[in-house]
Image (tube, rainbow, N blue to C red):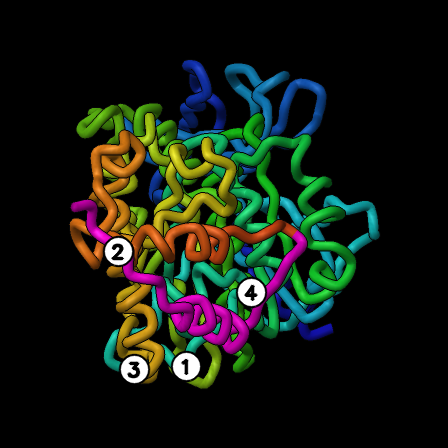
Amino acid sequence: MRALTAEISTIPGIRHYGRVASIQGLMVEVAGPLHAMGVGSRLSVTTRAGDEVVCEVVGFRDDHALCLPFGPLTGIGVGCKAELCAEEPHVYPSSAWLGRVVNAMGEPIDGKGPIAQGAEPCPLRNAPPPAHLRQRVRGKVDLGVKALNTFISCCRGQRMGIFAGSGVGKSVLMSMLARNTDCDVSVIGLIGERGREVQEFIEDDLGPEGLARSVVVVATSDEPALMRRQAALMTLTLAEYFRDKDQDVLCMMDSVTRFAIAQREIGLATGEPPTSKGYTPTVFAELPKLLERAGPGTGSGSITGLFTVLVDGDDHNEPVADAVRSILDGHIVMERSIAERGRYPAINVLKSVSRTMPGCNSEEENLLIRRARNLLATYDDMEELIRLGAYRPGADPQVDEAIHFQPALDAFLAQRKDEAMTLEQGYARLAEILADHPAVPEEDE
């Protein structure tokens, strides 16, 4: 009843409506009460067949409001009625949303019937908590992936990016994290995802146990740009709801790049000039507004954010990747060359950074990781010479040591999709590997 009362209170006393003046591509121009509209306002356009299509005001030109649809424009023509909806879009989440799959509007799409609504409205466009009131990131979170737990440790409330090209294994790594991460609630946003993979992710990767503590938000690649953008906003809104209930939330989004592409489509449709590689200025204004919503809250709850970034042409310095990397608290780099040799997850730990390390580790753990990194870096520097046979064993003790440990360290960084390893097990296994001292090779006379 409280939810119903809250929803009734949002119904305006006066109903404003206009008429469709023109349609150009996906842009619908509406003439009407501009004084009652603002950017972000919602209009319900009635088609010739009597159906309703929700549109959002994205700008103004002359005496018309520029609107983009959340659905197909079939049946909409000049003169169709466009009625102004509630001024600010809200959603009413509750604990009953756990175990459900919803679309960008918060409507269930899993065939399990309606979802019980909560009492408190949560705005889709919410501001991050005030910087001076936010808690600091807390102790390490167990991600279940040994390469990340040891070399790129993540804390509760930290925001990490997973950067990779297409087909390198981002989605598989995301599924491992969704299943194995130690958290109270998972909120997973599949933004611009392939429709074929959604059911596979839910049934094979999450499974019944993982889904029971998760909410999955889906907007497939064929949906309008507004739906794809709103799915990202919905994901953060749901994560904020559970965080404010003093729960530790894992928020995963695949991917931020598709959110940026959707925002670019919206910007170009409104006449924004393309600036960097076709991306409009609003893309780089919206990214921090979205990503800053993750992180610690003002109470004991937190949102640990893991956001994938699809790098264009394996260029890790392309505009979206560069902008996201500057906002987040660390980045996980996945490389095609590692995947091509058959080591998964294809994480390059030397190029990956967690900004909470080494502060979150003990001194013993830092010494262990520092030694392992030095061995990996030494082998990486000399790898080409070693493979060509140009390096002579015994010429450099450090290189000899790196060659000795390389097979074991490479095997340590590999992990099967159905395998999990805790933080303690990861450090113990790495210490066991590095305790095996190599024999000193004899130099050729």
Answer with mark 3 or mark 4, whichever residue precedes in sequence: 3
Considering depth in this image, is 427 or 249 the residue closer to the camera?
427
- Stretch of the chain drawn in magenta: 418-445
- Where does label 2 land, which residue? 327
The kind of residue on which mark 4 rests is Gly
The kind of residue on which mark 3 rests is Leu
- Where does label 3 land, which residue? 133
Question: Which class describes the residues within 10 Å of circle 3: few (<14), some (14-19), or many (20+)?
Answer: few
In this orientation, does residue 363 appear? yes
Q: Quadrant of the N terminus?
A: bottom right
> Which residue is the extreme one toward the right?
112
Residue mark closest to the camera, 2 vs 4: 4
Q: Residue at x 33, y 79 (%)?
A: 360
Q: Residue at x 54, y 50 (%)?
A: 174
- Where does label 4 land, which residue? 144
Horizontal side of 392 relative to 47 (left or right) equals left
Q: Can residue 369 be found in the magenta stretch?
A: no
Decide: marks 3, 4 in contact (CB < 8 A)?
no
The kind of residue on which mark 1 rests is Gly
User: Label 3 to label 2, Cα distance in Å?
Assistant: 19 Å
Decide: marks 3, 2 in contact (CB < 8 A)?
no
